[in-house]
Image: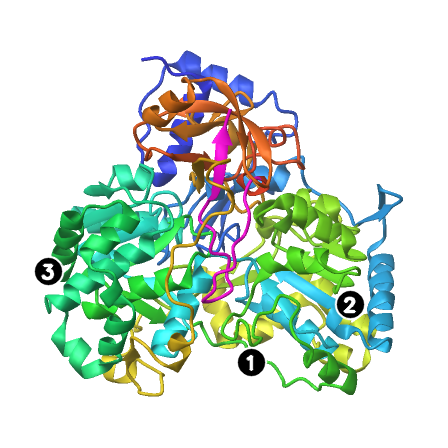
Amino acid sequence: MKVDRRSFLAFILGGAAGTALSPLPWKVTDDISIWSQNWPWIPVPPKGEISRVSSACTLCPGGCGISVKKVDERVIKIEGLEGHPVNDGGLCPLGNSAAQLLYGPTRIQTPLKKVNGRWQKIAWQDAITELAGQLRQLRADGSAHTVGWVAGSDRGTVPALFNRFLNVYGSPNFWRTPSIWDSYELSLYLMQGTRSMAGFDIANADFVLSFGSGLIEGWGSPGYMFRARSKFRQAGGRMDQIEPRLSKTAAKADHWISINPGTEGALAFGLAHVIIKEQRYNRNFVNGYTEGLAERFQQAIDGFPPEIASKMTGISAGTILTLARDFAAARRPLAICGQGQGHLPGSLQTFLAVHTLNALVGNINQPGGLWAVPEPDYIEWPELEIDAVAAKGLQQPRIDGAGTDRYPNARYLLHRLPEVINASAESPLQVLFIADANPAYSLPDTAAVASALEKIPTVVSFSSSMDETSALADMILPNHMFLERYQDVAGAIAFPKPIISLAQPAVEPLYNTRHVGDVVIQLAKELGDTIGAAFEWDDYNACLEETLGDRLDGLIENGYWVDDAFSGAPWADAFETDSAKFEFTNNDIRTLAAYEPIQPEGDEAGYPLLLVPYDSMRLNGDGQPGTPPFMIKALEDTILKRNEVLVEVNPATAQQLGLSEGRLATLATPIGSAQVKIRLTQGIMPGVIAIPRGLGHTAGNRFLTGKGANYHQLSSAADDPASGHNAAWGIRAKLS
């Protein structure tokens, strides 16, 4: 068997998903060692004392515990933390490769300010004094609401500090980066009356019906999903995967059901139609603990009999009937949705339809079901003293339209920000802070995002490495890398229990960086008055110690706190709606636009194909903090060959277009174009083509830039009429 360097690295990284390492010839191993150490920035640790630090990974919202192995003060290996409730020793390739981000060449080593288009070093105090002067002037001008903050998350003390700063300063404009969890959160609010996270007890389900969720590609918390899926499969559980492409998750499922992209909601309504009409629902739950089923059936579901759903989805009516009956007959069936890793929010009506399926079978807050998981409630800070300037600013509407009459239930609509800014003669934002996010890479229509960022007078990035957003910023105040800092991680995406993990520094900061929490506190103190008074702590660590209180010692010792007793409220107490029941429909749901598949941008005549993205475990699709070089080097030749990304095309489609395997082609959409290579596969529907997310970087280093194309430079957003979220699932395209 031939084993080349790329396949060896792929094999190593694949171990994170449970692959076992087989013996290899010593010559190959030696070649790898020599080759990898030719990179001058790769540390070669001396002999010394071996130690470990328990911490938490913050590279995604997964909340995995990690064990950091060191030789003296040099990090040499990152592994999953044994016994951690989320991942119990498992870890995804991104977490495994974190040391590369710590020691890599993309690190920003000191504060930078752009002067006449060139970066110049600036002292920390000078940078904070300059920003404080700008912010002070905006308040004096009555423009406090023109300051905004973009963060990767809204949970934990660090985002809470951002929000606290904006509130006492006088701006309502805080955003977190979009994902399917926005739609799940809103679905739980509308139907169950609670602002909770969605948790999934997949391990104890016996039938998982997945509407595109990439359980093997990084959906939810990867570490938890690997373990839960393994337990589920070992117990004989059935999994059906519904998506237009044969993903790794689909390949490992019991059934792959290909579907016309964007019609998942129609299928869910079609399944619900069968379950209700044939009275296969859980009568105990539906009759005793729900409201509005008849109305929901008449208004929405009755319009989707199998014959109609079949025409929309491309799935036969017989398959829909069988699938509905099998799902309802299972003891613990669970329906989940959200394509790939879940970075694209999707249609709210689709999420409501899928949640309807879980309600019909009564699998809410039950073993093997969907649980409404409250956010750990431990941030108890003194009430803010809001002065007149702040009060006036907070009364201004949000720039993105969230919470307004148009989108009353939405909390964050970051994807709308470029459109709003670019449509204005003058930017409605004067200062924008960005932390743990890379919108210039991850938001749709990257050219429009770049244009919007350039219109904002002052953009401040807290990134610890140079990325697309940092490159466009006016000032970079580099945060400690997560292996250099303390930070609480509140919750774990899709994990069915409240949990807090603690990131702890494995090493002292390597460069002249600062914890972003320290910067916020110092900036507030520099502004003084009510703003300074709201931040009574000397630094972030003091804030964290006070906030965690009695939990701190246990977190330091174990790395986590988990509410083991949590099992979801019983049905009689589970719902915070007006009826105190699960509501299939209510006044808020009635006002939503009726379900219709989101139409992709582009004229079908000019763009006859449908381009959809897909995710890979070895690619970080949201652009922050970027994909480590080892993961790029380990990509399959079916994703990236040399510097060209491969686009998946069905042979029947290729024949119609006169395309062949490996041919270079131009992929064009109404938004942009890119050079690609053709990969022929039966694992994608005719008329649909697919491209991976996570390539096409334009900033960073030579290991990342110039490789492939960024899907988001080719895609556009589509406002979901029901929520305002970006519901785009793809875009029309052509190959030539």
Q: Is residue 615 left or right of residue 38?
A: left
Gap in Å between the C-alphas at discs 2 and 1? Answer: 22 Å
On the image, the x and y values in percent for residue 536 come to: 71, 78
* Residue 32 tag number: none
Callout 2 amino acid: Leu
Look at the picture and state if 75 lies above or below 158. above
Is disc 3 placed on a helix, strand or loop? Answer: helix
Above or below for 75 versus 1:
below
- How far, Cα to Cα, is label 3 from label 2? 59 Å
Residue annotated with mark 2:
523
Q: Are marks 2 and 1 in contact (CB under 8 Å)?
A: no
Residue drawn 40% across the image and 53% down it: 221
* Residue underneath mark 3: 329
Q: Is residue 113 above or below residue 692?
A: below
Taking 34 as reference, is 651 left or right?
left
- Stretch in magenta: 714-736
Q: Is residue 584 left or right of residue 146?
A: left
The local secondary structure at tag 1 comes to loop
The part of the image, by quadrant, that contains residue 515 is: bottom right
Q: Earlier in the sequence, mark 3 or mark 2?
A: 3
In this view, the residue in front, 21 or 689, is 689
Secondary structure mostly seen in magenta is loop
Q: Position of residue 373 (x, y in %)?
A: 37, 70
Name the residue tied to disc 1. Answer: 380
What residue is at 12 percent from the left and 59 percent from the top?
Answer: 330
| Residue 314 image offset from top left, x and y in percent | 27, 44
